[in-house]
Image (tube, rainbow, N blue to C red):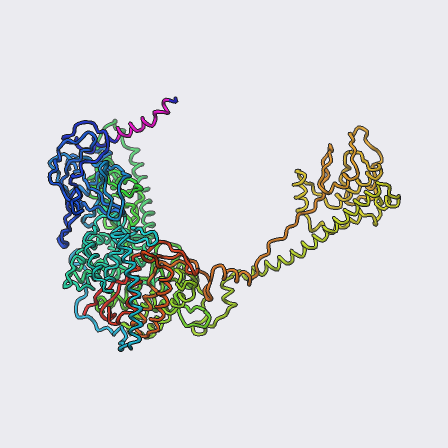
Amino acid sequence: MLRLRRYRYFVLTAAIVLFLLYRVSQNSDPWDSFSGKLSSTKPPNSNTDYTTTFDESETIEKIKNPTYGNHGASGSYEKDENVDAGAERELNKIKIPELKENDDVSDAVSGEDSRRPVTKPTPEEEDEEKDEEKDDEDEDDADDMDDATPPKTTPAPVIDIPDRKINYDNKGGFHDEDTVATTTVIHWKKVPEHFPVPTESIIPLPTGKPEKIPTIQYQFKEESAEAREKRLARLRMVEAEARRAWAGYKKYAWMHDELSPVSKKFRDPFCGWAATLVDSLDTLWIMGMKDEFEDAVKAVGDIDFTTSSRNEIPVFETTIRYLGGLIAAYDVSGGKAGGYTVLLDKAVELAEILMGVFDTPNRMPVLYYNWKPAFASQPKRASTGAGLAELGTLSMEFTRLAQLTKDDKYYDAVARITDALYDWQKRGTSIPGIFPDRVDASGCNKTAEAELASQRAAELAESQEVLDDSSESRPIRPFGDKTDISSSYQGPRHGQGPNSDSNQGESESGGLRQLERRSDAGEEKQLEKSLTAPSNTFEADDGVPFTPKQLSSPNQARSPGQAECVPQGLTAGHYEQQSYSMGGAQDSAYEYFPKQYLLLGGLEPKYRTMHLKVVEAVKQSLLFRPMVPGDRDMLFSAKITTRGNFPDDAVTEFEIAHLTCFLGGMFGLGGKIFDQPMDVEIGKKLADGCVWAYESTASGIMPEGASAVPCESVNNCHWNETVWWRALDPLADTREAQLADYNARKEELQAIKTQQEQRKKLAAEAKNRVAVGTGGEDESSKEHIAGSGDAGWADKATDEDDESHSVRGSTSRLREGRITGRSVPETNAEDVQERRSTAIEQALHTDGHVEKRLPPPPPEKNTDRSKLGGPPASEDTTTPTKTMNLKDALDMNEGNTIERDADQIPLQVEPIIDDPARPQSHKEYVKDRIETERIPPGFSNVLFPNYILRPEAIESVWYMYRITGDTTWQDKGWRMFEAIIRNTQTEAGHSAIDNVMSPNPSKTNEMESFWIAETLKYFYLLYSAPDLMSLDEWVINTEAHFFKRPT
């Protein structure tokens, strides 16, 4: 047994090796020109050429990919053309023959830490794939291999060997001379659409001369020399911080998504496509950082959008940051005349990938796109719980791309979303004019589907009954008889092959075979061979395949339990509660209505109509004025939750959310272009509310999320500290009641303690007197102690016990039980005291000694107490006796036990009385909370005290300055800037912080791409010349990317 245990690891290792060799032999032909044993996993010669090429679409120039090979003298990597792919390697080397270059694979491996060599196995012939049905072939990606040309030489299998010796650094890790890990990099490729839009049905861009839109910007006058000097000094300080952040990113996180400014490392949360680089492009141009812009543009050409270490593309973030950043950089740098055409080319490359998200039955997008061909090639349907902002914040980017490329398909994709929202707004929501945060964009009516499913089940059950009845009259056929016996049954047929009519092109398992579970390393799920056949199977937004039915085909065979898809428009997500606000998951959808109107030159009136309905709903249902010291006139937008019966079941949260701070800019912009002066005034108050939130905290920065105390009336609002305290302590009445109860109990306990002290004093006196009596005390003292009259001390003690019995109650009995270790019978204090008196008198009548005997039975309540005063009239001589002195008898109440044969007499124990914890009063609670949580006046709570370098507040401040020309907005913005830099600055950039309520918050080591793309850009433009990026010439997406307005 010991030997088996000793060698079990060797046996296990040998089994694994044999299994791997078996899989290799099954996945490919024998390796050519290979001799000797496979004795190690060392790499091939470093001059092996792994380079492949990737052909772009016709609209994109061919991008030169990096190669892998020898280090040249200049430090670059060179190819060695003198590689003999069929040469025999050393015995300790793995033979990796030269592979045929594949148009679908690029050697630029996009990874979070390194670029790795690429090898790709050649597919089997199509006929052989149909004949062979081995399980190991499931790992072959049929979609990736369809277009590959088989090489003349036999390919080597791909062996994925994890290598811990990879040198990870910012430029990518490369293998050393001893080991090598080969892997297959999966690339996106264009697949045929399942639900294409006919050419004649594509919605075209509006044409014609743009409508005349009122001027947005204030007509600034020439500033004084002093004002100009002050403005330029501030401008230079903003630029210096932008240069600091960019330099840190370039040094420590180049070509990665984000810089970690404290640790000086990087993160890749957005597919690893250099999010900060792309997001910052137009900022660099606007700030005059032309050299940095040139470097960034060159790097853009090296980004490979066709592959990512992330399995799903977040469509919203990718659109506003990457697509918006590329388009804006192209626009601000002069467009086609500027010469940076690579920016538009890469925008088209990315857009072609993203267009796959619209390939759904109702053309509503899948918002988390499984881009790998094995999944992208499958039918999909939009989510039943899509975020409103994610769904509605795609229009500007695709519209501007359509304008630049003259390709209407990009506009068609987002125009259909707008049409769906417009239709939904007309049909009405729980709060007319605005939408809930979660949207069912699937296009299928679940309620109607359930009804149809029930009807279908009934029909199926009826058909089954008919089938059962008819089968009873059929003759029994011999085994193996294949004569058709199902002519009267029209249900699904089995065993007829994947292309049978009843199966609609699906396999026996229902169309899609099982997918392999996604590994921890993020490897792609591989589809089985059945995916190469046509399929009606859909994939929902969460990646779960499903098969919709066509209502127009009543004779189509259906499997039990499959649901019909009853078409419907957009509606609320299938949640019990609906949330309405201008905050997260909703904000930018509303922001795009007036901006899209500007981008289209006013030629699409739907956006005007939708915007005006939104602002009316916000004014009627969401806006509130917080109650603050000084009665400052400002506004915030609340959040309302309802179950669909608004306003009866509405629950309002008076939130102060940083994300809602964009609203001031939106009201101001919409008020100007749609000639709504009142909206401009509301925009001022909304922007000033966020300025107040910045000024109120210890750090000078607004928290991510908090709540305020609202005024009862917007027009009549005065500071009331009592009301504020009530908001801080909603349980004020309960707290005061608890304090009153405490005081009452305190008095009762004090009385009990006084009684206990009196009893202890009497007991001590009694002991002293008895001690004196046994030592020669006169008879009068003994009579006084032993007497049974009312003047005796025992009776007095009993009276005290009677008075306190109601207070002690069960607590005393419980503690007595703990001391004796036994259950305590229900006895009152009077009984116990009488037994104690009996023991004392027995001791006195025996000159200090008593006989240990069975205790008397418990007395009846009305028994004459005088009968219990002395010893019994007769004694049982058979009872064992033991003497004890008088002190032991007197100490019975102190917890000493006496040996006896019968049940022990319960002992009277003084209860341990602890003072209860004193509850805080309403005043004490509020003061303690204000001090501990640093809650400013006007706030009722601060649930999210962090700050992640957000731009929304300074965005609205900038809009107000450009719209009104009031320089006080510059002063407000400067106080915000100084506070932010003071608390977030690091050596390598700027970091998010954890608690703005603290004067010294901690840094969280994150610098999101919008810090340079938005926040610093708005600060810069607040102090730049007003005509730089004028609102009358440009329109800005939600990521602060500037698009040129039509003229």
- Magenta stretch mostly in which secondary structure? helix
Q: Quadrant of the C terminus?
A: bottom left
In front of the other: 348 or 108 = 108
Is residue 501 visible in the rendered image? The answer is no
Tell me residue 584's x, y (percent): 35, 59
Query: Is 280 rendered above or below residue 131?
Result: below
Q: Quadrant of residue 1018?
A: bottom left
Q: Residue furthest right?
A: 779
Q: Is residue 18 magenta?
A: yes
Give the magenta-colored segment's residue range.
3-19
Tell me residue 244's x, y (percent): 29, 59
Query: Is 494 rendered above or below residue 188?
Result: above
Query: Is 593 rendered above or below residue 134?
Result: below
Side of 234 where 76 appears, left or right: left
Q: Is residue 798 magenta?
A: no
Side of 88 where 528 appears, left or right: right
Is residue 88 visible in the rendered image? The answer is yes
Q: Residue furthest front?
A: 73
Q: Quadrant of residue 700?
A: bottom left
In front of the other: 115 or 827 = 115
Tell me residue 263's x, y (percent): 34, 51
The number of callouts visible is: 0
Q: Quadrant of the N terminus?
A: top left
In front of the other: 567 or 831 = 831
Tell me residue 964's x, y (percent): 31, 74
